[in-house]
Amino acid sequence: MSSSNSKEGHASKPGKGAPGLSEIATRAAIEHLRSVLPKSNYCCGGSIPLSTDSPVTIRFDSSSTSSIHKIQFPSSPSSPSGIKELLLASERATFGLDGKDVLDETYRKAAALNPNKFSTNFHPADHGLLDALGQVLLPDYGLRLREKKKDLWGVKAELYKLNVYSGPSGKFEKHVDTPRGALQFGSLVVCLPYEHQGLCLSLSLSLVLCTVSFLLLEIE
């Protein structure tokens, strides 16, 4: 925005006017983030108990027929795992870059199922995960909003994709997750219990590093 003033019939050179409301709001948001980020948590992790008596069940479409397959985590010794059928039904995973989905297995090598291809009985809210995320990750200033608009306060999780990283070369290089909506503030990664070796998830913000290790998992 620019303005000009006239004096004695002569127009002055255009100058930069006052910032607009949008710019003021953006500056205020940035300054607030700068003040709270150094003392805020940017990630968290943990585990929840699961058993073969009440497993996580995933049903997915077959890649070649109209049948539906099922896989359970953790799987019981008496039932087939279904992991081969899951890999056959999955597609090569892409990643977001400059607003596009890109396939490059030198950067990311994994299999994936979109949510319209599978269903599951697992929801993080049933295990208290969303409440825990809200307590750990949401800034303290949100407590004032909570008092005024309790119906707008909380964390919502949406099923995005089922990813399968299989050995020996499954990987995803260092990256920043592509936001899938204006209200998304993070990604919730759920590692399902399947016997394996290898896998280490590292999260970093500036010089602060947090590592979640899944290097060895044995199902008893």
Image (tube, rainbow, N blue to C red):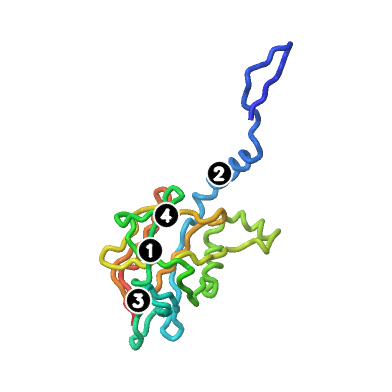
Quadrant that contains the C terminus = bottom left
Rendered view: 170 above or below 36: below
Q: Residue at label 3?
A: 85
Pointer 2 with pointer 3, Cβ within 8 A = no
Q: Amino acid at mark 4?
A: Asp
Q: Residue at left 59%, top 56%? A: 140
Label 4 crowding class (10 Å Cα cut-off): few <14, some 14-19, many 20+? few
Question: Mark 1, mark 3: which one is toward the viewer?
Answer: 3
Residue under label 2: 30
Q: Is residue 16 left or right of residue 123?
A: right
The residue under the point 49% across, 49% down is 38
Which disc number belongs to residue 101?
4
| Residue 56 on image: x %, y % | 45, 78
Q: Which mark is residue 187?
A: none
Q: Earlier in the sequence, mark 2 or mark 3?
A: 2
| Residue occupied by mark 1 | 212
Q: Residue furthest left?
A: 168
Pointer 1 or 3: first along the chain = 3
Q: In terms of sequence position, does the residue under pointer 4 or pointer 3 come before the other?
A: 3
Q: Amino acid at mark 3?
A: Glu
What's the amino acid at mark 2?
Answer: Ile
Q: Nearer the viewer, mark 4 or mark 2?
A: 4
What is the distance, in whole Å, between disc 2 and disc 1 at their CAs?
Answer: 29 Å
